[in-house]
Amino acid sequence: MRIVIAEDDPLLREGLALLLRAEGLDVVATAGTPDEALVAIDVHKPDVAILDVRMPPTHTDEGIVAAVEARRRRPDLAVLVLSAYVEQSFATELLGGGVNGLGYLLKERVGRVEEFLHALRRVAAGGTAIDSEVVAQLFTRSRQDTRLERLSPRERDVLALMAEGLGNSAIAEKLVVTDGAVHKHIRNIFAKLDLSPTDQVDRRVAAVLRYLEDLRRLA
C-alpha cells in the first residue's frame, strides 16, 4: 500500500509516517500544505491519501478541498480524512461525490493503532470508514428530521455501524445479536429511509448518504 500524508503539524505528520512504516506500509511522501499534497499525489500515484481537514493558509476546509480535487483527478484514489472535531458540512461535502474508498476519522483514533489501521485498510480496499463519534454526534444534531426519527434506537445503532463500514456479521458481533436480527434492522432502515430495492444504487451506501444529506439540509 502506497500512502501520501498531508498534515501541517510536523510532529503528527512524521509520527504518523513512522507508525505506518513500522507496520510495513509504504509512505511515499509527506506534505504540509494542500498544494504540496496534490503535487505528491500526482507524482507518486499512491493508493491512499491521508489528509488533515484544516490546513494552511486559512485552516478551514483546505484538506477537504484537496481531497475532492484529488478524487476528481484520480477517481480510484482512496482518501482518509482526519479531523480534530466533528465537522458536519465537511463530512457531507466529502461524501457527496461517492463513498467508495473514503474515510472520515477523528484524529484521536490514530492513537488507537489497530482501530486506525483497520479503517485505513478498509478504505484502501474500496470500503467506507466513518468515525463512530462523527455518526453519533451527527445523529444528536438531527433530531428535528422526521425521516430519521422513524428509526428505532437499535436501527440507529446499526446505521452508525454501517457508516463505519462494518458488514452484517461484524455488526452482529458488535451489538451481540444474531445475523438475522441485523438483516431485519437493515431491511427496516431501507424502508424507513424510502430506499427501494429497485433503486440502481448500493442501498447501504445510500442509507448513509441519505442520512448525511438530511443533516446538511438542517445545517
Image (cartoon, rainbow, N blue to C red):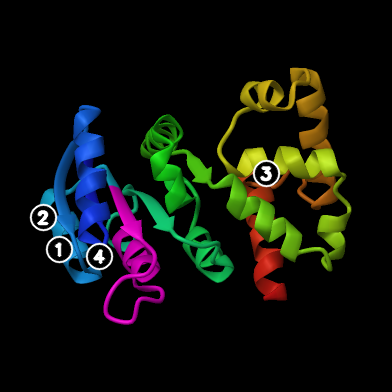
| Structural crowding at the residue carrying mark 3, measured as other residues with C-alpha within 10 Å and reported as few (<14), some (14–19) or many (≥20) | many
Q: Give the SS element for disc 3.
A: helix
Image depth: mark 3 or mark 4 in front:
4
Query: Is mark 4 in CB contact (under 8 Å) with mark 1?
Result: no
Which range of residues does the magenta coloring cover? 49-70
Q: Residue at x 84, y 68 (%)?
A: 144
* Residue ID for mark 2: 43
In this view of the protein, which residue sits in the foreground, 211 or 54? Answer: 54
3 or 1: tag closer to the N-terminus? 1
Q: Position of residue 190 (x, y in %)?
A: 78, 44
| Structural crowding at the residue carrying mark 4, measured as other residues with C-alpha within 10 Å and reported as few (<14), some (14–19) or many (≥20) | many
Q: Give the SS element for disc 4.
A: loop
Relative to 4, 177 lies left or right: right
Query: Is mark 2 in CB contact (under 8 Å) with mark 1?
Result: yes
Q: Residue at x 81, y 57 (%)?
A: 148
Q: Residue at x 21, y 50 (%)?
A: 4
Quadrant in the picture for residue 112: top left
4 or 1: tag closer to the N-terminus? 4
- Residues at marks 4 and 2, CA–CA distance in whole angstroms: 20 Å
| Structural crowding at the residue carrying mark 2, measured as other residues with C-alpha within 10 Å and reported as few (<14), some (14–19) or many (≥20) | few
Q: Amino acid at mark 2?
A: Val
* Residue ID for mark 4: 8
Instruction: Identify the disc placed on residue 160.
Output: 3
Image depth: mark 4 or mark 1 in front:
4
In the rendered image, the vertical position of residue 217 relative to residue 95, given as above or below: below
- Residues at marks 2 and 1, CA–CA distance in whole angstroms: 6 Å
On the rendered image, what quadrant is the N terminus found in? top left
Q: Give the SS element for disc 1.
A: helix
Instruction: Identify the disc placed on residue 39.
Output: 1
Q: Position of residue 171 (x, y in %)?
A: 67, 28
Q: Amino acid at mark 1?
A: Val
Per the image, is 66 magenta? yes
